[in-house]
Image (cartoon, grey):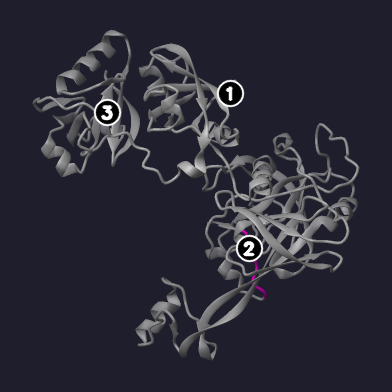
Amino acid sequence: MTTTAPRQKPRAAASHFAKTLLGAALVSTALAVAPIAPAHAFAAPESFADLVEQVKPAVVMITTSTVVTEPAGGMPGFPPGSPFEEFFKEFGMPNMPGQGPQGPARPHRSDALGSGFVISEDGYIVTNNHVIENADEISIEFANGTKLDAKLVGTDPKTDIALLKVESDKPLPFVSFGDSDTMREGDWVMAMGNPLGQGFSTSVGIVSARNRELSGTYDDYIQTDAAINRGNSGGPLFNTSGKVIGVNTAIMSPNGGSIGIGFSMASNVVSKVVGQLKEFGATRRGWLGVKIQDVTPDMAEAMSLSAPEGVMVSDVPDGPAKEAGMQSGDVIVSFDGNPVKDSKELVRRVADAPVGEAVRVVVMRGGKEQTLLVTLGQRELAEGSDGSDDGGKATPGGSDGEVLGMTLSPLSDQLRSELNLPSGMIGLVVTDVDESSESFDKGLRKGDVIVEAGQQPVLSVGDLEARVSEAKEGGRKSVLLLIRRGGEPRFVAVPID
């Protein structure tokens, strides 16, 4: 089971930790001291004591206070789905909203603990969003016992990062971000924080793996065996030069305790988010305006590509890419002067690009490269829009048929109504699939709509048969189909031998 390293409620049972959901990214920083020249490898010192002494003043314990509602009489209410909820129901004591087993609910304050670190002498502090989420009051405690009230500057739930600010009469010790891309498997790292509410604590381990993905679009986790427990959320992961190369966020554990599989969001992701939160109070990610998928070996062969690299554009709704002339079926091979290997890489690159900036995007179309100049939009403003392009031509009549193990029918007004499809959609409806066919093995199912074959529209069964014949004559082993399922587009390469 993978869980976040959540904020710690004082004296709370550790079993609660195992029930928390996956976390997202964190933040980090490295101490403002004379920089140490990075070595080719981060060797382990004879002792970590000097490093601890160097960075500890910038690591903080975070206490939050939130008003919660629990029943009177000392009997807590239980969340939906809790086994205790079923227990009370069985014995005739339902846990109704606002009404606990022993009387009406009453509000009170609940405290929770987490970790963080200072990134500037004027008091900016990084932690996890889930550490301070819904908090009414946030207090910061330094290792020397100094306590300051903090205000929330901004949050990014997508990466689980929050930026806080405290006011101090004197400059505060702080740490700086390092380059997480320089870290290698086997390099020594040191985690600091407030595990299990025990106060400031240090643990040491190595980088176990890189580029781990857990649950988010922008995930880039460093896996470490340094002990990370409840209450470590938001704490920094240092290299041996005292630079923050990750933020401790999640662990994999069957019981909620550390078993040596912890995850820290890479500093190169975190630092960009923190910069935007500091400047704007929110993130401003670039937006290309396309639906994409990775190019598989079958798809590359069907399109006569030299290798399964780049990103296939499956749909181009209204947005920056469409305005620049991008089309469904284009394969993005370069973004802003750098090659694109897969969809994950493209998403991160676009998100990191400045909003409103015109970037060069190179696509493969019809076997030839084309360069498009796309002015990026802002993802946050675009999210929630329909993003679909339902325009199309009227569908001519036609008859049913069988191709590639599928029984197909041209879209009619009746079928559009039955399948709840847009009135302008064209293509062939899959009414049945032979389970022994290649089409079934590739994931095609009853109700799918084939919109294109060989990157050309299909209006009839004859159109699809012609595209299959053309692929065979061209010496290809598969034909590329564009299907829509539930309104979502996807390319599938179906073998034709």
Q: Give the percent coordinates (x, y) of residue 187.
A: 76, 40
* Mark 3 or mark 1, earlier in chain: 1
* Dominant SS in magenta: loop
* Mark 1 or mark 2, earlier in chain: 2
Please give left or right for residue 470 compared with residue 25 in the image: left
Q: What stretch is highlighted in magenta?
A: 5-10
Kind of element beneath mark 3: helix
Amino acid identity at mark 3? Glu
Please give left or right for residue 408 compared with residue 103 in the image: left
Amino acid identity at mark 1? Asp
State if disc 1 and disc 3 touch (CB < 8 Å): no
Kind of element beneath mark 2: helix
Nearest the eye: 407 or 343: 343
Nearest the eye: 90 or 151: 151
Q: Mark 2 points at which residue?
A: 132
- Categorize mark 3 by other alpha carbons within 10 Å: few (<14), some (14-19), many (20+): some
Q: Which mark is residue 438?
A: 3
- Distance CA(mark 3)–CA(mark 2): 51 Å
Is 433 in the magenta?
no
Q: Mark 1 points at which residue?
A: 336
Amino acid identity at mark 2? Ile
- Distance CA(mark 1)–CA(mark 2): 36 Å
Q: From the viewer's perspective, is the residue at label 3 or at label 2 nearer? A: 2
Q: Give the percent coordinates (x, y) of residue 495.
A: 30, 22
Q: Let me know if residue 286 appears in the view.
A: yes
* Mark 3 or mark 2, earlier in chain: 2
- Categorize mark 2 by other alpha carbons within 10 Å: few (<14), some (14-19), many (20+): many
Q: In this rendering, is residue 253 above or below 149?
A: above
- Categorize mark 1 by other alpha carbons within 10 Å: few (<14), some (14-19), many (20+): some
